Image (tube, rainbow, N blue to C red):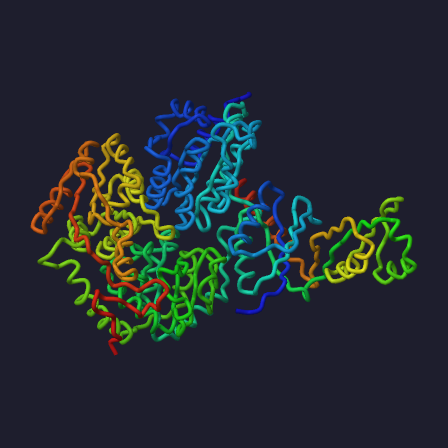
């Protein structure tokens, strides 16, 4: 068996109730733990995009993606390794303001991590950082000593490095097919 | 002009518009409005009242498998909906088109643990092709047309429509019904890639020892003529899966028998010698492959399937052809050369002879000792001219009857292959008789499986259905007993059965019945059963220690074959 790697699965679906369940049970069946999950409307109206990461091996992820794509309401499903995509996660850190105020090097930390401050109140400060897992984690490690009260990291979002836009092409072909069928219908 | 009808009536009219004429079902609280409408549509829609909802699903499967049309099931919510789960799972595994309508509590009560509420969509999603909850009468035409389109096209399968009670009662405008023929996200019949056809044809034309695996997909695509034409043109032997057994006549000279655990020796051994395998509409089930790491390793594998998720799922393919079996075989036929494979065909002979001598002759031509299952199946098949529809339950009765039944026509074997559902047989036989009333239906079962759905004898009684029931009664859960004997040192844990008087039981349902105790009684009893107009039960007293051979133990290489308690297969050359 090949070593397990982090795979990013991108699923484009119709906007319908119950699709997340249909996708997640396919992971469950193969006992794959979902590391991150992010769902949002895509750039195409009516099409939703799921971005899911999980550790697996290539043969397993290949079968899994085919079984996801087989679901009726799924338009297309793909899988990628990290070198095939540009990806990002976002993290928020809520830290007690009084603890930050005693830190002489706050500017250096913000600069080094390229973090942003979203809100400051007398009680707490919220910092934001986007980046790869290691990058958001590294800021987390650094802020630990300030007694982080809340920390949250989003699921991964990703775009492909490939120049071909398969989903757009797929939808164009499907719409063409629909028009053909409507023509046939008229002639009947 | 406004044409307002209730959602319940819209459902019934939609079913009729889809060509449905038979429904298997059982009424209940959350589906009463639809049953009320059915009362007015009895001429157009025949409703068969089963005795348990599981029976409705298997009857619909039997109906579909014999006729090629979708089976339709209607039940209420809650326990009725959970009772259809086994049938849904069975239909999903064996690619059987089925539309199941479950009643559901009113939308406003959903999620409140209302009386007879169950999360039907949640529990059916993993084992159906599609499931959808109709919460508004406006959705009915859309949902029903999609349900039939999805269930019957591509790789067929079961679909659930969960029909909320408020949607049954609401009024909706009835317009002309339009069948669905397009879903953006679903491509049932992919365009076949010519380069895949060319690659496959090149492999077949260069092959010296080609072998076809014929699966259920051939039956679903009605590709039996193309299978025969391709096999004959290039003289390629055909090995069948259990569900593919009637895709080519049993007596066809190129039919080398069944693959798998209890398949034919020559067919299994050929998988270790073939240089090119053409697997059509089959999915390399573990009961076929045995040890997958050794299966067809020496061969180039061409896999034809309409479901691309089957490619490389179990066996790595050299050429995968994504498409409908009929279309693909037609295309292959034009590119495959006429050829003779005399030597290859002759090489099946020694293995076939071994099986004939060591297994078959003992199974069907025994003259002493208790009656075996094989001889009963063989004799019933001959008495019906090899033309009957064979319906089986699961276990030894299934293996013996499918091994020794002869097939001359397509759509003649109805059995639970993938799920192996005990209790499948009786309702499936009932459904098959409704689906093909002109054909003789022979149902082989065991004393275990028959009792799992025995309540459906009531349907036979009610409709005076002519189903021949051959009970191979060994007072054991025979297949488990066989495994216990072989692999558990004969520790018969919970397999001996204390049984009722099956003859009396049948007679209580108005079914003619007789007990067969000895071999001398068998021929006469079969003759009487076949000649009898109407249902008949033969309760055949079988050797309690009866074993199905040949047998490839689970997970073993397919050339590791047991021929009897004492003997293993030895290679013939």
How far from the left and from the top, in percent, is residue B196? 48, 66
Q: Which image quarter holds the C terminus of chain B?
A: bottom left
Q: Residue furthest right?
A: A104
Residue B198 seen in the figure: no
Q: Residue furthest left?
A: B520
x 67%, y 61%: residue: A164
Asked if residue B520 lies left or right of residue B13, the reply is left
Q: Residue furthest bottom?
A: B573
x 36%, y 26%: residue: B42
Asked if residue B289 lies left or right of residue B537, the reply is right
Identify whether B331 is placed above or below A127. Answer: below
Residue B490 seen in the figure: yes
Closer to the camera in the image, B157 or A142: A142
Closer to the camera in the image, B229 or B186: B186
Asked if residue B20 lies left or right of residue B373, the reply is right
Closer to the camera in the image, B156 or B553: B553
Identify whether A12 is placed above or below B163. Answer: below
Asked if residue B89 lies left or right of residue A143, the reply is left
Identify whether B254 is placed above or below B391. Answer: below
- Residue B436: quarter of image: top left
Q: Which image quarter holds the N terminus of chain B?
A: top right
How far from the left and from the top, in percent, is residue B528? 11, 42
Q: How many marks?
A: 0
Closer to the camera in the image, B65 or A113: A113
How far from the left and from the top, in percent, is residue B526? 13, 46
């Amino acid at each position: 068996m090949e070593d397990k790697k982090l795979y990013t699965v991108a699923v484009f679906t119709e906007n319908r109730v119950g699709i997340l369940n249909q996708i997640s049970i396919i992971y469950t069946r193969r006992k794959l733990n979902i590391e991150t999950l992010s769902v949002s409307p895509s750039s195409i109206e009516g099409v939703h995009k799921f971005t899911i990461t999980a550790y697996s091996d290539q043969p397993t992820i290949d079968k899994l993606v085919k079984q996801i794509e087989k679901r009726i309401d799924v338009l297309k499903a793909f899988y990628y390794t990290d070198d095939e995509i540009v990806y990002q996660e976002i993290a928020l850190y809520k830290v007690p303001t009084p603890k930050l105020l005693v830190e002489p090097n706050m500017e250096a930390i913000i600069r080094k991590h390229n973090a942003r401050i979203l809100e400051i109140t007398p009680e707490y400060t919220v910092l934001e950082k986007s980046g790869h897992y290691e990058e958001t984690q590294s800021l987390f490690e650094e802020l630990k000593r300030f007694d982080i009260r809340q920390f949250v990291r989003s699921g991964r979002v990703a775009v492909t490095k490939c120049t071909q836009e398969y989903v757009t092409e797929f939808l164009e072909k499907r719409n063409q097919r629909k028009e053909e069928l409507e023509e046939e219908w008229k002639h009947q | 002009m406004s044409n307002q009808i209730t959602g319940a009536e819209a459902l019934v009219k939609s079913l009729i518009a889809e060509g449905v004429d038979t429904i298997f079902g059982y009424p209940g609280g959350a589906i009463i409005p639809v049953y009320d409408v059915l009362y007015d549509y009895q001429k157009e829609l025949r409703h068969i009242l089963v005795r348990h909802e599981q029976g409705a699903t298997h009857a619909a499967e039997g109906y579909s498998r014999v006729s090629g049309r979708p089976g339709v099931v209607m039940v209420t919510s809650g326990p009725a909906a959970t009772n259809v789960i086994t049938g849904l799972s069975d239909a999903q595994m064996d690619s059987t088109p089925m539309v199941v309508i479950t009643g559901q509590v009113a939308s406003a009560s959903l999620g409140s643990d209302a009386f007879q509420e169950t999360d039907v969509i949640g529990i059916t999603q993993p084992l159906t092709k599609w499931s959808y909850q109709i919460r508004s009468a406006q959705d009915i035409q859309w949902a029903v047309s999609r349900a039939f389109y999805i269930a019957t096209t591509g790789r067929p399968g079961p679909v659930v429509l969960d029909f909320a009670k408020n949607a049954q009662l609401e009024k909706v405008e009835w317009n002309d019904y339009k069948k669905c023929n397009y879903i953006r996200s679903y491509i049932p019949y992919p365009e076949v890639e010519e380069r895949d056809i060319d690659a496959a044809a090149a492999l077949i034309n260069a092959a010296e020892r080609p072998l076809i695996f014929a699966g259920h997909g051939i039956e679903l695509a009605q590709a039996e003529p193309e299978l025969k034409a391709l096999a004959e043109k290039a003289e390629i032997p055909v090995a069948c899966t259990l569900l593919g057994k009637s895709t080519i006549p049993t007596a066809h000279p190129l039919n080398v028998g069944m693959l798998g655990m209890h398949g034919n020796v020559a067919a299994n051994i050929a998988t270790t010698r073939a240089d090119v395998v053409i697997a059509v509409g089959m999915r390399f089930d573990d009961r076929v492959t045995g040890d997958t790491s050794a299966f067809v390793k020496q061969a180039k594998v061409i896999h034809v399937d309409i479901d691309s998720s089957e490619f490389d799922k179990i066996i790595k393919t050299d050429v995968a052809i994504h498409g409908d079996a009929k279309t693909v075989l037609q295309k292959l036929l034009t590119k495959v050369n006429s050829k003779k494979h005399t030597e290859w065909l002759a090489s099946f002979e020694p293995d076939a002879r071994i099986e004939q001598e060591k297994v078959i002759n003992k199974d069907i031509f025994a003259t002493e000792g208790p009656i075996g299952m094989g001889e009963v199946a063989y004799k019933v098949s001959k008495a019906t001219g090899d033309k009957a529809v064979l319906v089986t339950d699961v276990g030894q009765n299934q293996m013996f009857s499918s091994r020794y039944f002869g097939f001359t026509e397509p759509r003649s074997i109805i059995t639970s292959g993938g799920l192996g559902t005990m209790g499948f047989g009786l309702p499936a036989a009932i459904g098959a008789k409704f689906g093909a009333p002109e054909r003789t239906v022979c149902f082989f079962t065991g004393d275990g499986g028959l009792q799992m759905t025995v309540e459906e004898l009531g349907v036979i009684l009610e409709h005076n259905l002519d189903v021949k029931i051959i009970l191979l009664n060994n007072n054991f859960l025979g297949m488990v007993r066989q495994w216990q004997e072989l692999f558990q040192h004969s520790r018969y844990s919970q397999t001996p059965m204390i049984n009722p008087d099956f003859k009396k039981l049948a007679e209580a349902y108005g079914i003619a019945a007789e007990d067969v105790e000895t071999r001398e009684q068998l021929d006469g009893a079969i003759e009487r059963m076949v000649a009898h107009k109407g249902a008949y039960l033969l309760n055949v007293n079988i050797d309690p220690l009866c074993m199905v051979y040949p047998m490839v133990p689970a997970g073993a290489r397919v050339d590791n074959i047991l021929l009897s308690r004492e003997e293993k297969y030895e290679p013939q050359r």
